[in-house]
């Protein structure tokens, strides 16, 4: 939703001002929201391949189905954002270029926080393994 309001704010919209659902600005803002969700889900799919292993320890090409899915998502993202037929069919509109400068740091933050969580989980698991009674 932050990207929705980012687009509106960049265009000069202010809270409390009515915006018709047929307004191209509304279409651009909803497209920005959808685009942000898609980008964050692409980041998430790579982060969720393991609950404790770092993304950097897993080959990105091990699961070709994920790569095909991401490629399809990106193609749909381009269609929804920039193709006139996609805009007409789905009532979307191109998003301003500045949106990507807003979205990328969100994806980087999500990536960094999840990698930090995984590092803490690995450390906790190692500590628990060291405390376990030894057999023998």
Image (cartoon, rainbow, N blue to C red):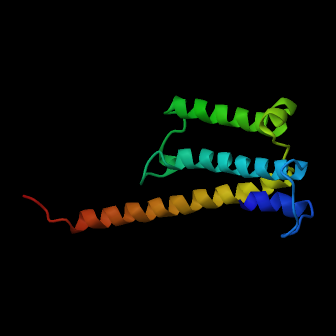
**How far across and how far down the image is residue 136, in percent?**
7, 58
Q: Residue at horizontal 77%, vertical 47%?
A: 31
Q: Residue at horizontal 59%, vertical 56%?
A: 111
Front residue of this view, candidates 23 and 96: 23
Q: Residue at horizontal 72%, vertical 47%?
A: 35
Quarter of the image where the N terminus is located: bottom right
Q: Residue furthest left?
A: 136
Q: Name the side, left or right, on which 129 lies relative to 53.
A: left
Q: Residue at horizontal 71%, vertical 47%?
A: 34
Q: Residue furthest right?
A: 12
Q: Quadrant of residue 105?
A: bottom right
32 to 69, vertically: above or below: below
**How far across and how far down the image is residue 20, in percent?**
87, 54
87 to 8, vertically: above or below: above
31 to 89, vertically: above or below: below
Total marks drawn? Answer: 0
Q: Name the side, left or right, on which 129 lies relative to 136.
A: right
Front residue of this view, candidates 113 and 82: 82
**How far across and how far down the image is residue 91, in percent?**
81, 40
Front residue of this view, candidates 84 and 109: 84
């Amino acid at each position: 939703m932050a990207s929705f309001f980012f687009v509106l704010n960049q265009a000069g919209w202010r809270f409390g001002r009515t915006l018709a659902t047929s307004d191209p600005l509304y279409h651009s803002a909803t497209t920005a929201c959808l685009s942000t969700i898609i980008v964050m889900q692409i980041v998430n799919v790579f982060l969720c391949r393991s609950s404790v292993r770092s993304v950097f320890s897993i080959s990105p090409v091990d699961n070709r189905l994920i790569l095909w899915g991401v490629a399809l998502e990106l193609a749909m993202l381009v269609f929804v954002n920039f193709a006139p037929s996609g805009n007409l069919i789905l009532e979307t509109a191109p998003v301003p270029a500045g949106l990507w400068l807003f979205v990328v740091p969100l994806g980087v933050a999500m990536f960094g926080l999840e990698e930090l969580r995984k590092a803490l989980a690995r450390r906790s698991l190692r500590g628990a393994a060291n405390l376990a009674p030894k057999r023998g």
